[in-house]
Image (spheres, helix red, strand yellow):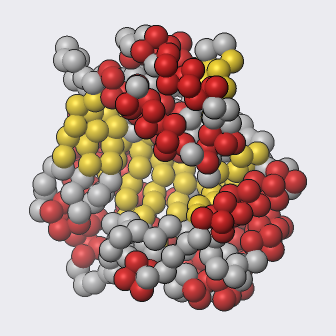
Amino acid sequence: MSAPVPDSNLDPAVRHLYVHVPFCPTICPYCDFHVLTRRAGLVERYLERVEEEAARLAHEYAADLGTVYIGGGTPSFLRDAEITALVGSIRRHLGWGRAENTLEINPGTVSPARALLWRDLGFDRASVGVQSLDDATLKFLGRQHDARQAREAVGTLVRAGFRVSGDLITAVPGQPLEADIRGLVDLGVGHVSAYTLTIEPGTEFARRGVTVEEDDERRGFEETEARLTDLGFSRYEISNYARPGQESRHNLAYWEGRTYLGLGPGAAGHYPAPPGGKALTTRRTNPHLYDWLAGEGGEVEAILPGDYVTDALFMGLRLRAGLDLADLSRCSGVDVRARYAGSIATNVARGLLVLEGDRLRATPQGWWVLNRVVTDFLEG
Ligand code: SF4
């Protein structure tokens, strides 16, 4: 990994920024993110509001950014002048990441000229929504790109000098998963995010009654790990794999319980709490596009020490390295080992967790039932 981002979970300076771009060319049938297709005038209003919100965040928090992540939606669907304006607003008010700047990219939006523009704007990491390299699987998923476009897009981004991460969806009926994994790795990605197809309520797939069999889900989970490990990747988080040094520093900030700014409609931020109160941090979730455009501020939740600890356990156990209970006790003021002695002992005895010194981590079996493990802590 290159230069580390100086950080401490509750440092008053915020070192990470997430920006949500809510526009997509079409809406995929499994998607339950906050997205919509573009229409006249909407992107212009979005960009004006980004400028205002970036100025407000700069006024309220000390930003010293290590990472910036522009996600969505499909940020690469923004036209060249639009993405240039978006980056300009961020740089003007909040600065830019010293260690990693990621743009989420849809394969159908890539050309060599655009890849160079994105590099010139300061992006060094591309997260590409490949999902599969099999045309029938992509068609089933309702994606707008085909396998040839996905291959060309990743190749173009690798040649332009990006650190490239490819997204894969697993457990799709009939998907040739092994060929998908090998094909993606052969294109030169150093990072893979692999998520099981899940059918969320309110999506097109839910309306059509599409289901995912638990056996397919489990096979996808195990086969992805086995193939990527053979190919030199390490599963450093439950759904994320990287070659050495290619981990997502931005996403590590979420899993390690750090604070981050959230900008854009529907974006969540995790902020240092005002001094003198009982809360350790606050979370603010912005409203959806039209309320956000109207200037509504979103929901703010004060995170008290006990909630901070359960959130940190939930996120930290997603990491292969797990989390350090002594550090968590120090920064929260909660004696975590004493408070959760019963839940820790029970899950260690079940073979779902391992405690080595102060470090608690999930076993592969623990990852498979992580929600159950975390429920034990919430109820313990
Ligand atoms: S491209 Fe991504 S964000 Fe957009 S609709 Fe499809 S799954 Fe959702």
Residue for point 53% across, 60% down: 103
Left or right position of 349 against 256: right
Residue for point 21% across, 57% down: 287
Left or right position of 31 against 272: right
Q: Position of residue 258 (x, y in %)?
A: 45, 32
Tell me the quadrant of the picture where the N terminus can be found: top right
Q: Position of residue 242 (x, y in %)?
A: 72, 49
Q: Position of residue 299 (x, y in %)?
A: 19, 46
Badge count: 0
Q: Is residue 142 above or below residue 337?
A: below
Residue 128 shows in the view: no
Residue 366 shows in the view: yes
Residue furthest right in the image: 230
Q: Nearer the viewer, residue 284 or 115?
A: 284
Residue for point 57% across, 40% down: 318
Q: Is residue 216 above or below residue 67?
A: below
Left or right position of 148 against 195: right
Quarter of the figure with residue 51: bottom left
Tell me the quadrant of the picture where the C terminus can be found: top left
Residue for point 81% across, 55% down: 226
Q: Is residue 355 above or below residue 208?
A: above
Q: Position of residue 227 (x, y in %)?
A: 82, 59
Quarter of the figure with residue 159: bottom right
